[in-house]
Image (tube, rainbow, N blue to C red):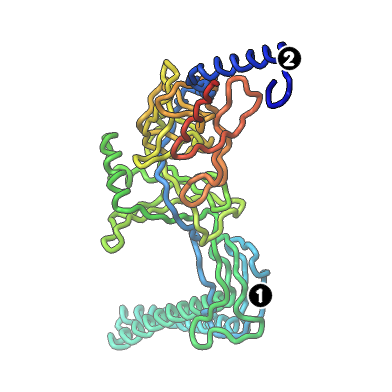
Amino acid sequence: MVGGIRVSGVARGGLALCAALVLSACEEKNTYVPPPPAAVTVAPVLEKPVTRFLELTGNTAAINSVDLEARVQGFLTQINYKDGQFAKKGTVLFVIEQDQYKAQVDQAKAQLAANQAAQVQAEAEYNRQAQLAKQDFASQATLDQARAKRDSAVAEVANAQASLVLAQINLGYTQITAPFDGAVTAHLQDVGALVGYSGPTKLATVVQVNPIWVWFTLSEQEVLRIKEHLAKQGRSLVSITRDVPDLDVQIGLQTETGYPHNGKIDYVAPQVDPNLGTLTVRGIFQNDDFALLPGLFTRVRVPLGAAQTTVLVPDAALNANQLGPYVLTVNADNVVAQTQVTLGQLQADGLRAIQSGLKAGDRIIINGIQRAVPGSKVKVEEGTIVGIAAPAIDQGNKPLAKPAGVAPADAPAVAAPSVAPSVAPSPAPATPKN
């Protein structure tokens, strides 16, 4: 009887069997079972020719900008353009009343004709007196007077010719024309306004925007770096100045991706500004579609020599710690290692150039970075590194969103891996087996 309840023999045997099983189970010891290796995607680093660039900032500027001014006094009678209109060289834009200046031209022509007639008469008189003097019928004094009148008449003609030219110039000033092809700003004086009465009066401005300039500066450190780079090529800054028309330069606006505008450097300052410690450089760009306007802020990059074979990795495969940027590599035994690298520039295809730390044949983890721990073994899935279109770029040429740049070997499409943290997480604790 158990607890006042009678128990049969069969029940007592069952209870004894259960107690024996419990005791045997408690005697077993807990054993550690390690977790399976983390699955990651691994790819060999990509190698291809890459051009190194010097990245700067600059501003666009009009290649020509001229104020149109009234140089003669008068009332403005015509404005022959619409504000902001593009005008060809020689197009008449403003007209000042011309009646007075036309009359001055006619007056100068009449004076010139009178002086020319007087010259003809003086020439004839001189010739007559010269013949008489040869025959001793005229005195030397009379001949000298005739010569003086002739010379005076010649001078009067020259003076009248100059007055006619001045009158014609003033008449020409009544028409203000475009000095070159360009856009004309809004007019500053209206029809009927008196202009030029107290000096030149500004009427408008003509701005030439095709081609267009881009000005930028190099710091003293950048100049020294370029000088050192040129020395390795057996060149000098003198050669750069001599070969300026052959130097390429690229720019991009703040709303553009990459550097879509290509031009040539056409000026390098002969000396570093001692006050600012900068060297001024200028590039010239074709601007047929007027995509570039004067005064815009631009990103500038200048190629530093020819393309060189460079190691490339996806930007998303990079992490950073106190020592700087690093990638996770996998050796032949599929063991993870943390490799510090020196970063180069972000390429147009979204890949990052690596200046040092990696070499051809090294394998890096491109997916599953969070699951990989340096020193641990991983389960490897082979993949490839592919370039993709670069995202929008800010002033520092850093991507606003990390590109994928990777694809597993059997993946049908490129999938963006998540960004790995700077410190890999600890492995999950082992589950004890009871």
Q: Is residue 6 left or right of residue 202?
A: right
The residue wearing badge 2 is: 8
Q: Is residue 204 left or right of residue 247?
A: right
For label 2, the SS is loop
Q: Residue at x 54, y 35 (%)?
A: 349
Write down the quadrant of residue 292 in the picture. Answer: bottom right
Q: Earlier in the sequence, mark 2 or mark 1?
A: 2
Q: Nearer the viewer, residue 359 or 31?
A: 31
Q: Is residue 226 left or right of residue 38?
A: left
Give the vertical position of 271 relative to 260 (above or below). Answer: below
Three-letter code, disc 2: Ser
Three-letter code, disc 1: Ile
Q: Where residue 58 appears, x then y in whole percent?
A: 45, 55
2 and 1 marks in contact (CB < 8 Å): no
Give the vertical position of 40 relative to 62 (above or below). Answer: above
- From the image, state whether disc 2 or disc 1 is nearer to you: 2
Q: Nearer the viewer, residue 73 or 215?
A: 215
Q: Nearer the viewer, residue 361 or 188?
A: 361
Q: Where residue 235 appears, x then y in whole percent?
A: 28, 38
Write down the quadrant of residue 125 in the picture. Answer: bottom left
Q: For residue 371, which numbered disc appears in the image?
A: none
Q: Where residue 416 appears, x then y in whole percent?
A: 59, 34
Q: Residues within 10 Å of mark 2 (few under 14, many from 20)?
A: few
**Residue 384 visible in the picture:** no
Q: Where residue 325 appears, x then y in whole percent?
A: 40, 38
**Residue 177 visible in the picture:** yes
| Quadrant assignment for the C terminus | top right
Write down the quadrant of residue 153 in the picture. Answer: bottom left
The residue wearing badge 1 is: 79
